[in-house]
């Protein structure tokens, strides 16, 4: 069963930032979203974040953060490098 991906404006902004800097990494991220996360996110190497009720998927040095809303929708919240993604989430969500 394929899921439908819903992308927040912040996620789109993150992708544009990666596109300007790292074209190859952007392709890997998009491939991971299309081929793994949207097909079956539970079979992927994902982890639930401790401070948030979201999941993260690792693509090299990048982390894709998303929420599985229901049985058909996945909301993509953020994507960035490992050492900045969690601070970015804290600032966006005002948690932890």
Image: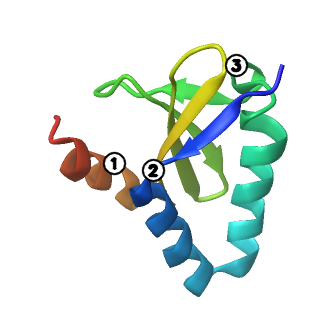
Q: How far apart are marks 1 and 3 (CA)?
A: 21 Å
**Mark 1 or 2 closer to N-term?**
2
**Does 7 sit left or right of 78 as displayed?**
right
Q: Which residue does the image show at 66% across and 21% down from the upper left?
A: 72
Which residue in the structure is indicated by mark 2? 8
Q: How far apart are marks 2 and 3 (CA)?
A: 21 Å
Quadrant including the N terminus: top right
Q: Which residue does the image show at 79% across and 37% down from the upper left?
A: 36
**Residue depth check, mark 1 versus mark 3: number of the one nearer the observer:** 3
Q: Which residue does the image show at 59% across and 59% down from the upper left?
A: 61
Q: Tell me if mark 3 has few (under 14), some (14-19) or many (20+) residues whose alpha carbon lies within 10 angstroms of its own.
A: few
**Does 49 sit left or right of 42 as displayed?**
left
Residue 41 in the image: x percent, y percent?
Answer: 70, 26
Judged from the image, the secondary structure of the residue bearing numbered disc 3 is helix
Q: Tell me if mark 1 has few (under 14), some (14-19) or many (20+) residues whose alpha carbon lies within 10 angstroms of its own.
A: some
Q: Residue furthest bottom?
A: 20
Which residue in the structure is indicated by mark 3? 42
**Mark 2 or 3 closer to N-term?**
2
**Does 47 sit left or right of 53 as displayed?**
right
Q: Which residue does the image show at 64% across and 13% down from the upper left?
A: 71
Please report contact status of discs 1 and 3: CB closer than 8 Å, yes or no: no
Q: Tell me if mark 2 has few (under 14), some (14-19) or many (20+) residues whose alpha carbon lies within 10 angstroms of its own.
A: some
Q: Quadrant of residue 77?
A: top left
Residue 26 to residue 84: above or below: below
Quadrant including the C terminus: top left
Which residue in the structure is indicated by mark 1? 86
């Amino acid at each position: 069963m394929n899921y439908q991906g819903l992308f927040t404006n912040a996620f789109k902004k993150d992708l544009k930032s990666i596109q300007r800097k790292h074209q190859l990494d952007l392709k890997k991220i998009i491939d991971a979203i299309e081929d793994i996360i949207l097909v079956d996110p539970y079979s992927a190497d994902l982890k639930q974040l401790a401070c948030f009720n979201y999941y993260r998927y690792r693509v090299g040095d990048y982390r894709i953060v998303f929420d599985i809303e229901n049985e058909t929708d996945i909301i993509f919240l953020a994507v960035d490098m490992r050492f900045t993604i969690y601070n970015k989430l804290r600032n966006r969500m005002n948690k932890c």
